[in-house]
Amino acid sequence: MPALNSFKRNIAEYLSGYVDGEGCFSVSFSRRAKLLVGWETKPSFSISQNQDRAEVIKMIQKFLECGFIRRDYSDRTLKLEVRSINDLVKKVIPHFQKYPLISSKRKDFEYFSKICVMVARRKHLNKNGLRKIVQIAYKMNPSGKRKYKQGDILKGLN
Amino acid sequence: MPALNSFKRNIAEYLSGYVDGEGCFSVSFSRRAKLLVGWETKPSFSISQNQDRAEVIKMIQKFLECGFIRRDYSDRTLKLEVRSINDLVKKVIPHFQKYPLISSKRKDFEYFSKICVMVARRKHLNKNGLRKIVQIAYKMNPSGKRKYKQGDILKGLN
């Protein structure tokens, strides 16, 4: 029915719906002896996809104008991932502020935004800022797996 | 940022995005000795959800004005399901014609629509119609599990 589809799609809303199901906001930490605080802070926004539905993440990449697509051999998916703090703060976060998630994933997004703003202000590079960031990050995605316990990171930050 | 969110959400597009990730269009068949053709045709549109994200499927149920929500104890999800052929043809299908899916799931939707229209016209109650329906249905969701092979159903329909 081409007539029905001739109006302009609202891809912004479509994207928020898609991400409410399939997207993930996460902040992970890696040991980095060379950093003064000993840990690297890595915020990431990602969308995993069966390889037969690559068209959606390609469209989202184009729409958000950021992120890279990579194969995840462990679970045979494609993943669109945004790790650049500049892109997260200037492109990803404003989108979901304007078109908010509706599911409880919205709470994760709010923690994520807070952390990204702190990272953009370089708060993760001093112990006090990193401690706050870790405490927020460990409230996110409670069912997800983590390599380190919160205490492992916090114990060096006093 | 309340000012940003004061415009009206386009839930229709959000819904298509969400369903492109999390929705399922399926047509299953059950043996029914009492039916002349021996098989019942059961089209179903469903969205599965972790129980902690119930708010989305409740919103979708309200938006589509149809379907029922049930617990799926096997995988601890909530499921919104529309089985009424009248609701499928008058509410669900027109929505996705107006706001099409973008992923390859769109192909499944097209087969699904064809079958629903045939069922609404009672074509599934004669052998010739049911044979066509089965042939279309077995092109859908090729990775899904099925209780019967296509041949099991077709062999009684000649």
Image: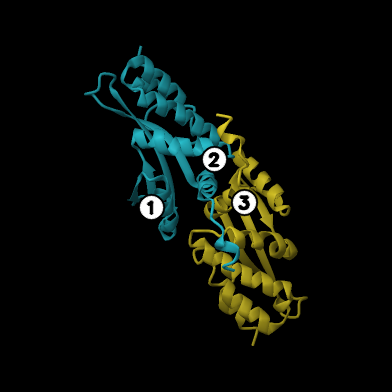
Chain colours: A cyan, B yellow
**In the rendered image, the vertical position of residue A109 relative to residue A61, given as above or below:** above
Give the class, few, some or many, for how many residues have Cα within 10 Å of label 3's Cα (few <14, many ≥20): many
Label 1, label 3: how far apart the Cα atoms are: 26 Å
Query: How many numbered badges does the structure rendering display?
Result: 3
Quarter of the image for the C terminus of chain A: give it.
top left
Position of residue A147 measured from the top left corner of the image (x, y, whole percent):
37, 32
Q: Amino acid at mark 1?
A: Leu
- Secondary element under disc 1, as helix, strand or loop, is strand
Q: To which chain does the residue with label 3 belong? A: B
A20 or B47: nearer the viewer: A20
**Left or right: where does residue B110 sit relative to residue A92?**
right
Q: Which mark is residue A127?
A: none
Mark 1 highlights which residue? A78
- Secondary element under disc 3, as helix, strand or loop, is helix
Please name the residue shown 73% across and 78% down the image.
B125
Position of residue A107 measured from the top left corner of the image (x, y, whole percent):
54, 32
**Left or right: where does residue A42 sit relative to residue B30?**
left
Q: Amino acid at mark 2?
A: Tyr
**In the rendered image, the vertical position of residue A63 relative to residue B142, given as above or below:** above
Q: Earlier in the sequence, mark 2 or mark 1?
A: 1
**Left or right: where does residue B38 sit relative to residue A68?**
right
Position of residue B23 measured from the top left corner of the image (x, y, whole percent):
58, 55
**In the rendered image, the vertical position of residue A54 relative to residue A99, given as above or below:** below
Mark 3 highlights which residue? B12
Outermost residue toward the bottom? B158
Please name the residue shown 56% across and 62% down the image.
A6
Position of residue A63 measured from the top left corner of the image (x, y, whole percent):
43, 48
Q: Amino acid at mark 3?
A: Ala
- Secondary element under disc 2, as helix, strand or loop, is loop
Quarter of the image for the N terminus of chain A: give it.
bottom right
Give the class, few, some or many, for how many residues have Cα within 10 Å of label 2's Cα (few <14, many ≥20): many
Q: Are marks 2 and 3 on the same chain?
A: no
